Amino acid sequence: MQDNFISGKGNPAKSADFVGRGAATERADFGGNAAEEAERSLWRRGQNITPEGLYLMDGIEGLRSLPRHSVDMLLTDPPYGTTRNYWDVPLPLPELWEAVRWAVKPEGAVLLFAQCPYDKVLGASNLPMLRYEWVWYKSRCTGFLNARRAPLKKTENILVFYQKSPAYYPQFEQGEPYKKIHHRSGHSPNYGAFERISGESDGRRFPGNVLAFPTVANTVHPTQKPVELCEYLIKTYTREGQVVADICAGSGTTAIAALNTGRRFIGFENAPAFYGPAAERIQRAREAVARGEKGV
């Protein structure tokens, strides 16, 4: 077990106190009085929370401890509440969205993994910000214990939320180039009149919302996601140097994907049993990236 954070910055001597105070801090509204906000700002500066590492603390408290609108993208795999595992307790959603509005930029993308029935609850908890979903098509099914009562689960959803339209960098797929010349005009009930004169493609195809990535073998965490999938999502919504946050860091996959793609990372994990292996994994990835390799 390492100290309470893995980072190039910060003061390890203060990290244990920070975890204790973070866990005990009241979930108050950010519209508190000036004295309370001043105290909170001093606390943040004193503990040196920076987008450079992984912290052992509650993720919602972690978001609330960051400077306002300092996160470009939130990518996290929250507990679905579908098992009896001690860590599988859903986040308090009203407090989650309060913290998101505080820490994530209005034009920042918020991507949350989910699966039925939790995806319905999660989406309905913030319909004004819910925009669309990606579907992860897995290489291995789950749900074998219920195979005689329900179909095996081959997919998981990734819900996309935002306040204002975020940057979008589609990860093009490769197809056959073509060139078509034709004349046609028409009218769409959704978009109005349009005219098409010619069509030409260099072979690139815009992505659909179904993403096929292999399921992870030999996992550090029971619900571990593929690094390549997280890299894909990070590259879709951010540029190099921007800040990606994860409030349920688990095995540290989001951090590794951020490192591999040249983004900065801030993460929070409140379970010591997962934090230690994740911190070590992130450190190995950081060293690999420094050597010009990819973290895994």
Image (cartoon, grey):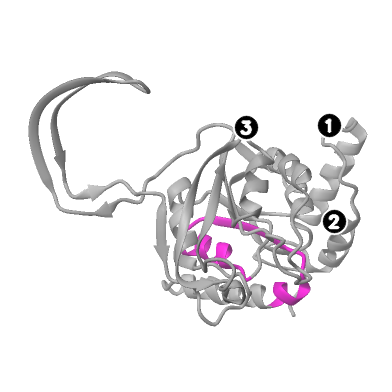
Is residue 252 shown above or below 165? below
| Secondary-structure class at tag 2 | helix
Q: Which residue is mark 3?
A: 128
Task: Sort mark 2 into few (<14), some (14-19) or many (20+) by Cα contacts within 10 Å.
Answer: some
Q: Position of residue 170 (x, y in %)?
A: 37, 46
Task: Sort mark 1 into few (<14), some (14-19) or many (20+) by Cα contacts within 10 Å.
Answer: few
Report, in whole angstroms, how far the alpha carbon at label 3 lies from the one at label 2: 29 Å
Is residue 44 shown above or below 140? above
Q: Which residue is mark 1?
A: 31
Q: Amino acid at mark 1?
A: Gly
Q: Position of residue 193 (x, y in %)?
A: 27, 17
Q: Amino acid at mark 3?
A: Pro
Q: Quadrant of residue 68?
A: top right
Q: Residues in magenta?
A: 251-276
Q: Is residue 49 left or right of residue 191?
A: right
Report, in whole angstroms, how far the alpha carbon at label 3 lies from the one at label 1: 21 Å
Q: Earlier in the sequence, mark 3 or mark 2?
A: 2
Q: Is residue 24 left or right of residue 268?
A: right
- Is label 3 or label 2 in front? 3
Circles 3 and 1: CB atoms closer than 8 Å: no
Q: Position of residue 139 (x, y in %)?
A: 43, 71
The single residue placed furthest to the bottom in the displayed view is 218
Residue 287 appears in view: yes
Residue 295 appears in view: no
Give 45 or 102, whichever is nearer the viewer. 102
Q: Earlier in the sequence, mark 1 or mark 2?
A: 2
Is residue 106 shown above or below 232? above
Q: Quadrant of residue 220?
A: bottom right
Is the N terminus in the top left, top right, bottom left or bottom right quadrant? bottom right
- Is label 3 or label 1 in front? 3
Give 111 or 280, whichever is nearer the viewer. 111
Q: Which residue is mark 2?
A: 22
